[in-house]
Image (tube, rainbow, N blue to C red):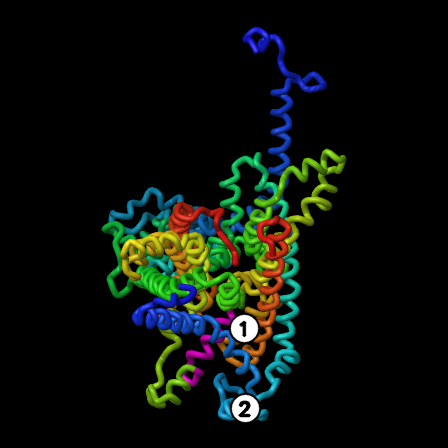
Amino acid sequence: MSSLPPYASLGQRTWFYTFRFLCGLIFFFLIFPILVIIPLSFNAENFFTFTPEMLSFDPAGYSIKHYMDFFTSPDWQAALRNSVSIAPAATILATGFGTLAAIGLSQSHMPFRSVVMAMLISPMIVPLIISAAGMYFFYSRIGLQGTYIGVVMAHAALGTPFVIITVTATLVGFDQSLVRAAANLGANPVTTFFRVQMPLILPGVISGALFAFITSFDEVVVVLFLGSASQKTLPWQMFTGLREQISPTILAVATILVAISVLLLTTLELLRRRSERLRGLSPG
Amino acid sequence: MSDTSQAETVLTTQDGVPLKVSIARALRRQKIRALLLVAPLFLFILLSFVAPIADMLFRSVENDLVPSTLPKTVVALQVWDQHSGTLPPEEVFAALAADFKVATKEKTHTRVGSRLNYEKPGISSLFRKTGRRVGKFEDGNYTEQFLKADKKWGDVEVWQVIKRFSSPFTAGYFLAATDAERTEDGIQFKPDDERIYLFLFGRTMILSITITASCILLGYPIAFLLSSLPLRSSNMLMILVLLPFWTSLLVRTSAWKVLLQQQGVINDTLVWLGIVGDDSRLALINNQTGTIIAMTHILLPFMILPLFSVMKTISPTYMRAAKSMGASDWYSFWRVYFPQTIPGIGAGSILVFILSIGYYITPELVGGTSGIFISNRIAYHISYSLNWGLAAALGVILLAMVMVLYWMYDRIVGIDNVKLG
């Protein structure tokens, strides 16, 4: 299917181009909604559609007022502050615990591995609304509902499965004899970990951390139930914005978030290539 | 090595410990080390995640309120036969008066009232009214005084409800969550027009199946194209799949909200093209169409990625062999290629289905009233109606459904084969 052979019949040719066209339409469906909000966020009017001025590329039809609104509105700024204070804390917790656990789980002598693994992965599988409900009930019993610590704990729990999966995947290619060699040369376990094992699994740890970060940064269901007004994050503010007073500032925020995801995606791709090179899985 | 020499010389390490013992000790040390590495996260997840889920399971059957607020009444009611059709004896009324006096002081009687109101409407106001009068009750002849305070106390059904909820555990929430109720003739389903939860569960299933089917329909060609293109161009196109995957859920939902509105981009384009009239703009949002379109878009990468990883492993020589033996393009695809992609379809479908039956945000924002899922009802009971027990019971049922699906996923794909990006 990659290219048409020279002897292809008319029917095959027609099908080949029809198929390509259909795929093009599906790709359009995938990417169009994300691209369309970018020009709309520069709309000079408070509309959610293209104005005639915008369509004729009149500079008067475009403005950055929605971005100004985002950077000056106290609501949005508070939400941004909360997001950038919750997500890193949750990421650090998730990455620290998750990396240690992944190393433990990859050892051949780990007892009850599958049961423990299933339990540690479970926050990823249980639907968010159920996690949110359970956490709301339980955290209000122990007084963590509506606190910063409660939200961070919940987000860290949701992020750990990603760290475990990525770090375990990197450890599959890790040569255990390197650890033995280090021990043989007189390094203690801590030195071995930081000087030998850590540099090699670092790409996995970082991509796990990125996953944990984006999980917390994008998360809205749990924080909606668990947080109080003083933990209002960006997604929460967007959610209320979309449900109640729908304002085009949301599109400006969305564009900024798309830029952040492009950045994260690029970083991850670079890390993946580096990790494969380090493990000798692919030449480039 | 002969038998005798083996019995006499036990292999030892340098310090004289038998080798077997030494190995066992080393193994044990390794096991403990592995456990110690896992322990911090294990405890953390136990506290922050497993305990909440367990708490929810507990809440879905818990019924502590009646026994703890009306302790004496519950004990006194034990001798009363609820099928007798007569009111409980004077001792029960005396116990109730005593309980009520304590409860009104602590203001807990209204909570019991609103809890029992879920079972029999009217009890909430009965409890509040009685709470105001009970302070003036004189000793003795309680039955008459209660009946004077509110004649509903003469209703045997009220007492039957109290007696039914006097045990510390109840199946009442689960019955309510499945639209059943306990009547005097045993457990029965509610009349058809009152069955909201079964209806919502059904709709959640049907919409999830529709979304999964659309994902297969749209995802299969894309995965096929990506797996057949040379690496360089497929990597480029893969970005178009991964970018939506990495974009915030709220961003994608707001994009659809913008696109699908009555005055939105899609309707404007259609009007401009003359396909629909300006006065007959399509209603694409706040209904099931909105939910299906937006969620298909959001979950499509979860279908494409597993399909792609399966198709990547299928050697193109099979198709070539089939064609060289005279099969047509369609026949060789359908009989040779397609059967090999079924594991991928299975994995992707279960993944998409699991994700979609628990969705909350997108249906809430673009689903209106006809496109909402059972999770929206759970959220409603937590935040607005405050019927936490019912929310927990609905959650437990949903969780059980997901667990069954997940178990199937584990059988088909294996939990360790979860891939990210």
Give left or right: position of A1 versus A122. Answer: left
Residue bearing mark 2: A57
Q: Secondary structure at mark 2?
A: loop
B155 vs B263: above or below:
above
Give left or right: position of B28 versus B231. Answer: right
Give the mark nearer the N terminus: 1 vs 2: 2
Residue bearing mark 1: A238
Depth check: A222 or A126 in front?
A126
Q: Quadrant of the C terminus of chain A?
A: bottom right
Q: Position of residue A41 (x, y in %)?
A: 55, 81
Depth check: B227 or B142 in front?
B227
Q: Quadrant of residue A104?
A: top right
Q: Main secondary structure of the magenta part?
A: helix
Q: Position of residue A74 (x, y in %)?
A: 64, 77
Determine the residue positioned at 58% across, 53% down: A282
Q: Amino acid at mark 1?
A: Met
Q: Which residues are magenta?
A: B250-265
